[in-house]
Image (cartoon, coloured by chain):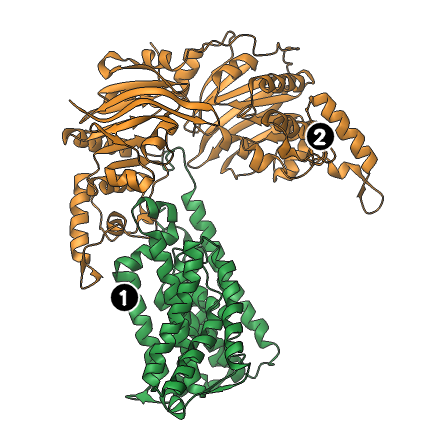
Chain colours: A orange, B green
Amino acid sequence: MTALLAFEELTKAWFGVPAVADLTLAVPEGATLGLIGENGAGKSTLMNVVGGVTPPTSGRMLWRGAPYAPRSAAEATARGVAFIHQELNLFANLSIAENLFVDGFPTRFGLIDRAATAERTRAMCARVGLDLDPATPVGELSPGERQLVEIAKALHREADLIIFDEPTTSLTPRETARLFEVIARLKAEGRTLIYISHILGDVARLSDRIAVLRDGRLVDEGAAAAFDVGRMIRSMIGRDLAGMYPPRSRPPGEAVVFEARGLDQPGVLADVGFSIRAGEILGLFGLMGSGRSELARAIFGLDPLADGTMTLAGRPLAGGPGARIAAGLAFVTENRREEGLLLESPVAENLSLVVARGFGRGPFGVIDAEAHAVATERAKTELGVRAGAIAVQPVKALSGGNQQKVVIGKWLMRQPKLFLLDEPTRGVDVGAKFEIYALADRMAAAGDAVLFISSELEELIGMCDRILVMSRGEIAGEFAESPFRREAILAAAFRETVA
Amino acid sequence: MKGKGDGAFGFALRNATAIIFATVIAFFALQAPGFLAPENLGNIVKASAFIGIAAVGMTFVLLTAGIDLSVGSVMYLAPLIAGILMRTLGLGVEAGLLLSIAAGALFGSINATLIVRLGIVPFIVTLATLFAFRGFGAFLTSSRQFDFPPEMLAFGQSSVAGVPTPILFFLALAFAAHVVLTRTPFGRRVYAVGADPEAARKAGVPVGAVRFGVYVISGACAGLAGFILIAQIGRLDAGFGEGREFDVIAAAVLGGASLFGGVGSALGAVVGATLIQTVKTGLVFTGVNLYLQPILMAGIIFLAVLVDSLRQQRLRAMKRRTIRPVSER
């Protein structure tokens, strides 16, 4: 078998940090390659390189032995690469037939030949087991049907390489079964597939070969028959990190600070319930798209819940974010730059953002500049923010780690009872990470409850008293024993049972 | 997800224009008995041809999530250039009509070049050309009234088989636009670009060419619209068409075109323009205080934009990313 697509010493670095490093891998023609790895292992970056979204930093790709360097997504499409993923590239306002033929309609006298498009669309749909009127608007289809339309589109284009990126996340079991039938048919036709998924059992079942990425490197590769779920998980993890976490200063107390019961948000969360005690750091682990951040948003009142109750310090938690902040909730969002900071404003102003009203004096609530300056300066020192004149220096001039300290600090000034930390160390260097961990410990030592959300299992193991695992919007496991069993946690996140 | 089961509210949103239209007609018919007379209704359609023709062109632009603020000025400048050529070269009205359309298309292509080639936001480009086109017209005429040859007026007041010429042009254009939008590759790509330009690019749609085309069409339609109305007056004042871009946009949006792109139709623009004219005529008919009329118009336009915005919110809610099957409970 010749290789349809081959990577040769391919590297893609962002600002000098490699997301894919020195990767050499071949995808044989007519085979199905299962590609797995933890969040941030480099799978998406690699697929973006294949799809022409970003060029590689060094190294090259070969397509049937000839150099392949797509400069745009359209170029990759023209070469025969098709992507099937969650964010589908379909037009909801056009019909199934129009979606298939939008790049080249058959015409008669300048008008679209509707009979011909309908007939050819029906033939394509039959190949993916879709029995629908070609004139149906795509907006009216279920997620599973849309995915099959996307596959029909790939077949219509005569795509040689079809890449499935987490195709089953929003599908019902029946739709998933139908998708797998179609995949089996594609394999029988001899098409080359790359199948990326966090559902390892599916990867093992569908693939001929399996490749495992970790930190941008290919760490394991071989025939699928030689892989079991245990080997996949062992290959994906396995970093050694010691001395990266500060010791916890106090054990958690007994009193329950926050309790959630039966939280339900159709299509996102299902029957989520848990509690956090005073002084406890509860870790929340889950893979990308498992519902971690959605849960945090729902707790903070940003997205409505269909069902469920929450209490904070014994009182029911309700209303919008404003009321919840007043009740003692603090939310450090995962999008620090977009949602957590006023980038152009001075550090001091950002620090006092949540408590600004507290500095109001007199009948018009004019801000007491002196008290403001004193309080923010004290906060800066306590937090260890490395900044000069905080009254004038804009936040955007700080490093990522220091920016995050400002975000956390703005909430600390308010003395909340429950902290929601969503990916607090993302994009932060190792030294600053340690300081953020120390801040989390300080919150807990002060008797507050902390919900620490992260896709980095290591930091949760390093910092938390208990770890909850989410998968597909549900709590898939709870781990309280120490030391934490890393493989069991990861298996719960991947919804697998390790023998 | 199927568009069913969202109840009366969803139904009202999808058919908002028809509901508003029916209410407006019923209201005026009750207020003024002569309102429903065939002659009056014919006059309404004739009067709406001017805004309607431009609104059909505007619909193309709105479908790509763009906007063309320069149509009011094109309505003025394109017929003016046609008129000057008619007078100096001694051309007939038919040639003048074609020249006006061509001039409009040319101005539209200036907009398109700035938007597509230079990548400037449509709002800013067409705001600038709104002033530039009118300024050029004022320069050509020194802001004086421009008189067309007398045949012009005869053309404007003519009719074919009892149907006034303006209505014929209006309906013919609307039909042509409808066919283009629903039955040609270009038309369907306009919808694709409006729905998701990035996905359109990935699907191999020539996004730049499509966006270029819609501004040319909008300009050409504005040129035709201006010529048709001037033919009914016989002369061109310096303030002709001023502020009409808002009537045109309002008509298109009332007809169901979304300012967010991807939604709308040529026939909708016809309905929208007729609705606006119905309200205008109705207000005169029922003797509403002249100074209150703009406020009532504003109310109707606000209603249309509100409906558009509500519809958009529902669309977004539908598109919300789910991480587990909704039905599995």
Q: Position of residue A222 (x, y in %)?
A: 25, 14
Q: Which circle, 1 or 2, is nearer the viewer?
A: 1
- The residue where tag 2 is placed is A414
Q: Residue furthest front?
A: B88
Q: Is residue A489 visible?
A: yes
Where residue B179 is drawn, which disc sits there? 1
Pick the front one: A306 or A198: A198
Q: Is A495 located above or below residue B264 in the figure? A: above
Q: Chain of mark 2?
A: A
Residue A300 shows up from this direction: no
Give the structural element (helix, strand or loop) at label 1.
helix
x then y, percent, for residue B269: 39, 68
Picture quadrant where residue B115 is located: bottom left
Q: Quadrant of the C terminus of chain A?
A: top left
Q: Amino acid at mark 1?
A: Val
A185 left or right of A442?
left
